[in-house]
Amino acid sequence: MKPNKFVNLIGGLATAFALPLILLIIIPFVRQSDSVPIHYPEGQEIEGGVVAYPDATLYRFGSSDFGAQVYAAEGCAYCHTQVIRPTYAGPDMWRPGWGGREEDGLARETQPLDYSLEEIAPLGYQRIGQDLSNVGHRITTRELMHQHLLNPKDIDPDSGMPAYKHLYRKSPFGKGWDPTPKAEALVDYLLSLKKDQPLPEVASTGG
Amino acid sequence: MTLPELTPEEIEERVTIDRSTRYPVMFFFTSAAAWLLVATLLGFISSLKLRLPGLWDDFSVLGYGRLFPAHLNALVYGWGMQAGVGVILWLMARLTRTQLSNRAGILVVGHIWNAGVTFAVLTVLIGYGNSLPLLDFPKWVWPFLSISYLLIVVGIIPMFCKRRESLVYVSEMYLIGAALWFPWIFITANIIIGKGTAPVMASGVGAWYITNLIYFWMAPVAIAVAYYIVPKIAGRPIYSHPLAQASFWLLAFLAGWTGFSRFMGGPFPAWMPAVSGAATIFILLAVLTTFFNLMATLKGCSKLWELSPSLRFTAFGMLMLALYAVLAAFSSTYSFGRDIQFSHFLVGLDTLAIYGFFSMTLFGAIYFIVPRITGAEWPSGKRIRTHFWYSTYGIITLVVSMLIGGIAQGGNLAQWDQTFSTSFVNSAAYVVGRALAWAMISFSNLSFLYQLTLMFIGKGRKSEGPTLIHANPGEAGSAKIAAGLQE
C-alpha cells in the first residue's frame, strides 16, 4: 500500500475523533475546571454569612467526604440518581421533597456547581430507588437514616433496597446494631445532600 | 458472479498465515469464553438480587451495587474486548496476507490484560469502585488495560503497512479504526475522571465513554466481521463497496458526539444532550446502510442460514445492530427519551449492544476462525444449535422485558403524585425476565465454552467437511453444495 494512502486513512480517523474530543469533551472540561464561585449581589444575602454560590461549608460536615467514597463503593449510584431535571424534561421537581425545600420556595433543578464538592458527580445510572439530590431535607435525623440503611423495609414495606447490614456490627450489649465508621460517614454524607442553595441573581447585562 | 479459483500456493499461504495466529488467538478466545461464563453468571445473580433485595444481606460482596458493575466489567473487558482482540489479530493477518509475528509477546500482553480485568472485577467487588459504569475500577487499574491494548495495536500497524495488496478492504478500515479509537477514548475518559476537577464532566464523560465504546469499538469490529464473513460464505463480493465506505465515514464522524443524551435535562449545557441526540439519530443512516448492504450481498442465499453457524450468528448480530441503532435513536429523541430516562430501558439497550449485536457477531467469527487455525472441526453441530437458540431466546427475553419494563417504569416515575415504590413494585416482574434471560445465556455459553475448550486442547473433530448446523457430521462436504448454490 502506498504510504500516503495509509496516512490519509489515519488522518481521517484522527480528525473524526479529534473534533468531538475537543469540542464536546476538552473545552467543557476546561471551562468547568476553571469555574469559580459566584458572589451574591448586594441585597440578596442569605443567613450564615454565606457570600457565594456554591459554598463549601454550607451543608458539608463531619466525614461527608469519606461518606461519598462509601456511597460510590457500595454502588449506590447504580440505583439512585442525583439529578433533578427541569420540568420540561420530567416531573422530578413536583415530587414532594425532591427539588429541595418547597416551603421556602427553594425547590429547583440541579445545577453544575451543586456538585462542586464531589470528585465525580454521582448523577447515577438508573432510578430504581428515589432520587437523592435533596435527601438531607427529607430524612433529617441520624437515627432515621441509620434505620433506612439497616432495615429499609421498616420504613416502606414495598422498598426494593437491600439492607446494608455489613456496615453495622451486632451490638455487644443487648440487642441492636452498632454502626461502623463507614456507616457513620455514609450517614454524614447522605444528611449533607442538599442541592438547593439559592442561586445568585445574575445582573442582566442589557444588550 | 463467482470468485476466481485459488491456486494450491495460495491455499498453502493461507494455511501458513492461519497457523501463525493459532496460539495467541486461541488464548484470547478461550480466556474470553471463560470470562463470558463468569460475566453471565454475575448477570444472573445481580438480576436475582435486584428482584429479591433481601437475599444475602450479610455479605457485602453480594450487593447489587457491586455485582452489577463487576458483571459489566467482566462482560466487556473480560469477554468482549478479548474476543475482539483475537478476531482483530486473525482478520488483520488474513486481510493483509502477512503472518502474525512476535507471538510470544502477544501472549505475554494477553496475560497482562487478563490480570487487569481480574483487578478490575475484584476491586469493584470488594468495594473500591466509583459507581461509573465500566470505568469504576481504581485509578491504578486502567494503565494495565491501556498499555496492554496499545502494545497489541503497535503489533497490528506494521502488518497493515507491510501489506502487498493495493486494495484496502472495508473490513480493514473498520479494524484499523477500532484499534486506534479504543485507547483514545479509554485514556481520555480515565484522565478526565482521574483529575477530579470537573465532577459533572467526569460523570458525563462516563456516559460518553459507554456509547463511544459501542459505536467506536464494538460496532466497527462487528461490522468488519460481517463484511468478511458474509461475502466469504455467500461466495460473492460485497453488494456495494462505495456504500460501505460512505457508511464507514459517516459512522466515524458521528460516533464521538454521542453519549450526553443519556442526561436530558441533567446539569449540562443544553446543547450537549441535544448534539448527542442528533448524532445518535444520524448514525441510524450509517447502520441501516450497512445492514442493507449486507443483506443485499446475502440475497438469494437464505438457505445458508440453515447450515453455516458463522453466517447464522453474524446475520443475527447484524439484525440486532440495526435494532440497537433504531432503539438508541428513539431514546435520543426528546419526546420519547425523557420518559424512559433512568429506567430499565437503558440496561436493555446496553445489553442489546454488548450481547445482542457485538457478542453474537463475534460468536460467528469464532465459529469461522477456530477450525481454520486449529485444523479441526467443531465437535458437535447440535451444541452449536443449543448455543445459538439459548443465546437468542435469552437476549430477546432480556431486551423485550427490559424495554417494555422500562417504558412501564418510566410511566410510573412520571406519575409524580403516586408513591415512589409503585415504580419498583410494578417493574418487579420484568426484572424476573432479566434474571431468566441471563440464566438462559449462561446455559448457552456453557456449551460454547465446552466446545471451545475441546478445540483448544486439540480434541476437535478431524474431518474433511465443516460442521454444519442441520446435518450429521461429515454428511455434507460443503455448506454451499448442500444449499445447492454452486456447482
Image: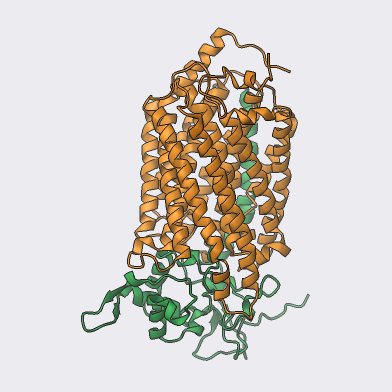
Chain colours: A green, B orange
Q: Position of residue B184 (x, y in %)?
A: 53, 45
Q: In the displayed structure, does residue A12 sit left or right of residue B390? A: right
* Residue visible at 42% across and 53% down in the picture: B42
Residue B293, can we see it? yes
Q: Position of residue B434 (x, y in %)?
A: 53, 56
Q: In the displayed structure, does residue B286 sit left or right of residue B433? A: right
* Residue visible at 48% across and 82% down in the picture: A136
B36 shown above or below B29: below
The quadrant holding residue B406 is bottom right
B459 shown above or below A82: above
Q: Quadrant of the C terminus of chain B?
A: top right
Residue A36, can we see it? no
Q: Position of residue B249 (x, y in %)?
A: 69, 39
Q: How many marks?
A: 0
Query: Viewer-proximal residue, B317 or B465?
Result: B465
B417 shown above or below A78: below
Which residue, as the protein is rendered here, is positioned at the far left? Answer: A172
The quadrant holding residue B102 is top left
